[in-house]
Amino acid sequence: MPYIKAWFHLVWATKNRYPFLTGDVKSKVFDHIRQNAKLKGIYLDCVNGYDDHIHCLVSLSTDQTISKVVQLIKGESSFWINKEKLCNEKFEWQDEYFAVSVSHSQVKRVREYIFNQESHHQKQTFQQEYDEFLRNYQFEEIAKTR
């Protein structure tokens, strides 16, 4: 049996960054994502976010890919949110997402960052966080080459 520990920090936003994820809606969505991930065999270490975006820390197993895990979490959760009528209008996630690898030694730091989203976003907007991700992980250069 192969032993694999591949950690990824995933981030994506609501469509047009509309602040759907407030109060009770946010806790219901995050609880559902945890339950669904468990059912789908996705090791979701933690999930949290702010009004208009979500952060997940996942560890992939041997037969999982980043794109499939993100698809399973995003697609199923938006379907569920609409089925449960948690929002007054149609809920959608934005198509794009960030996925960055996390070394095992940094898992605790990333976990704390995800858990502290409320206080983090008192000091920094999601747009600032987004721009920082682009710079720090050099996504801007990757986009230019495509």
Image (cartoon, helix red, strand yellow):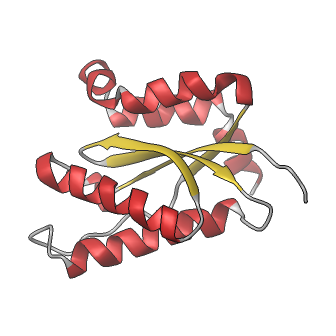
Residue 33 higher or lower than 129, as above or below: below
Q: Quadrant of residue 36?
A: bottom left
> Could you say which is closer to the camera, residue 10 or residue 28?
28
Location of residue 118 in the rendering, given as x and y in whole percent from the top left corner: 27, 29
Q: Is residue 24 above or below residue 137?
A: below
At horizontal 74% and vertical 30% (from top left) the residue drawn is 103
What residue lies at 62% left-to-right and 29% top-to-bottom?
A: 107
Which x, y percent locates residue 65? 72, 64
Q: Quarter holding the C terminus?
A: bottom right
Q: Is residue 2 left or right of residue 46?
A: right
User: As displayed, is residue 132 above or below residue 36?
Assistant: above
Dividing the picture into quadrants, the one containing residue 138 is: top right
**Residue at the top extreme?**
123
Q: Is residue 19 left or right of residue 1?
A: left
Evaluate whether residue 114 shows in this view: yes
Residue 95 at least partly seen:
no
Q: Position of residue 72 (x, y in %)?
A: 52, 71
Which quadrant, please, contains the N terminus? bottom right
Farthest residue, direction bottom: 83
Residue pictured at 49% horizontal, 63% vertical: 37
